[in-house]
Amino acid sequence: MKQIMLHACCAVCAGYPLELLKEKGYEPVVYFFNPNIHPEEEYTRRLNELIRHCEKYGYKLIIGENSTDEWFEYVKGLENEPERGERCKKCFEYRLNKTAEKAKELDIDTFTTTLFISPHKVRKDILEKGIQAAEKYALIFDDTDFRKQNGFLKTMEIAKAENFYRQKYCGCIYAQKMP
Ligand code: SF4
């Protein structure tokens, strides 16, 4: 089976993409790299749900560094941007570059992200940053649209069945503060 690195932001968003990638013949290697999730309690909560899911279904999970300071530095000056704006593009860039770097290190030539399943995110921005990261590391960015065929609904059904914790905001303190 061909491995694919799946950057996963949380268990809720990972549920359906994992099933779909398996159906497509891939062996997903899950990569949790999300220093954009604050506060730390929330980060740990989301991570623990993903650990539980990966252990239950036997997915390999790699936990990246929680480089919060570096993330804040990366999005500096964009604190007041609305969600779906410039800060989010930088946030995607940061996480997808690190995912590509990890995939390269592990000799996995293809990667993708669960970010594609969220209806709250701009697909073309994720695509652009994923393609750039793939070019930088000479990898393939799999652009499967996880939202197709009711993907979001399916992932929410899995979340319900697995009794996942479901967060109410994207991740960063800036999004958390916004109404
Ligand atoms: S709102 Fe979400 S995607 Fe945008 S910067 Fe914050 S954590 Fe990243």
Image (spheres, grey):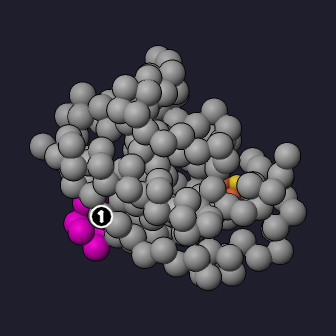
Q: Where are the magenta residues, as a range? A: 103-110
- As drawn, the residue found furthest toward the left would be 1
Between 20 and 144, the one nearer to me in the picture:
20
Image quadrant where one finds the N terminus: top left
Q: What is the x, y in percent for residue 165? A: 48, 42
Q: What is the x, y in percent for residue 138? A: 38, 65
Q: What is the x, y in percent for residue 150? A: 50, 18
On screen, 139 above or below 165?
Answer: below
Ligand 1 shown in quarter: bottom right
Question: What residue is disc 1 on?
Answer: 62
Q: Is residue 21 visible?
A: yes
Which residue is pictured at 67% across the width and 47% down the height?
A: 169
- As drawn, the residue found furthest toward the top would be 149
Left or right of 6 in this view: 43: right
Which residue is pictured at 64% across the width and 50% down the height?
A: 170
Q: Residues within 10 Å of mark 1 (few under 14, many from 20)?
A: some
Left or right of 57 in this view: 21: right
Which residue is pictured at 26% across the width and 53% down the height?
A: 29
Q: Is residue 143 visible?
A: no
On screen, 158 above or below 79?
Answer: above
Q: Label 1, secondary structure: give it.
A: strand
